Amino acid sequence: MKNISTLVGKELQLYFISPIAYVVAMVFLAISDFLFYNQIQYFSGLSMRMMQFQNDLPELNLHDAVFQPTLLNMGVILLLIVPLLTMRLFAEEKKEHTSELLMTSPITITEIVFGKFIAVMFVYLLLLILSLHVPLMLSVAVDVSWKPLFASYFGLFLMGGVFLSFGLFASALTENQMIAAVISFGILIGLWMVGTSVHAAGESAFRVVVNYLSISSHLSQFVKGLISSRSITYFVSMSALGLFLTHRVVESQRWK
């Protein structure tokens, strides 16, 4: 654990002394705030129209009308942003020729992979926490259903584990950060878009498999406020797969 904590501290220091974390955070928060603002405006306009026609304040579900579509769109934004967080983790080590020092140190490959993963997961979690300022401000004026909201954020957190583990895998494949980002984009978009082929699959075993592999279908369950053990198993298993593949790639390069 000491080796992992040391590596986590080193990676976090590299994140926060460079502009990467700050630029990514600013872009993510600006886009997420814009998404929230647009959905709140739509919700307010819909409420006003319903009041005009019914002469009464309708009972509207804030979570379904505002948070659910916004958080699903936020998942897409995170899909595009996460590769920017992970692209340097191994690629930069190779380019700067510091990977040889890391590989010959007493630290194990498992500790290296987990140390880098925990560090970037901390940065990712910080982004999610910062985005909570909008629900907190809304709670001053309206009643916010916190349970489905926290279920939604738990889903985004688990989804982040999958995104980051495969981003780590992509970074381990090359010393070029841009190539690592593109590979990561390709993998994550594939996992997100795989659900679009469900409708063409009919009622077949293939449909079941494809639907299970789709990240978006599992995230939508959490965003609806439903915490499913099936979806938790999926996210944890996919994160473990990404870390396993990263471990195998790093291990194969250690003996070259």
Image (spheres, rainbow, N blue to C red):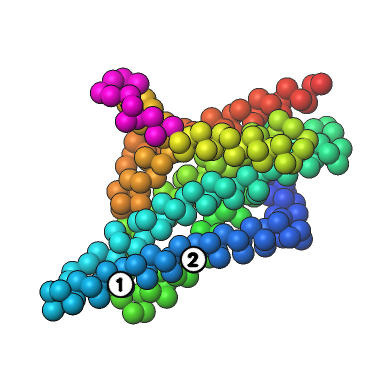
* In the image: residue 11, left or right of residue 216: right
x, y percentage for residue 24? Answer: 64, 58
Q: Which residues are magenta?
A: 194-206
Q: Is residue 102 magenta?
A: no
Residue drawn at (22%, 67%) of the image: 60
Residue 45 circle label? 1
Q: Amino acid at mark 1?
A: Gly
Disc 2 packing (10 Å; few <14; some 14–19; many ≥20)? few
Residue drawn at (25%, 23%) of the image: 203
Residue drawn at (31%, 73%) of the image: 44
Q: Amino acid at mark 2?
A: Phe
Which residue is at the front of the view, 51 or 220? 51
Disc 1 packing (10 Å; few <14; some 14–19; many ≥20)? few
x, y percentage for residue 204? Answer: 28, 20
- Which residue carries the number 2 mark? 34
* In the image: residue 181, left or right of residue 29: right
* Local secondary structure at mark 1: helix
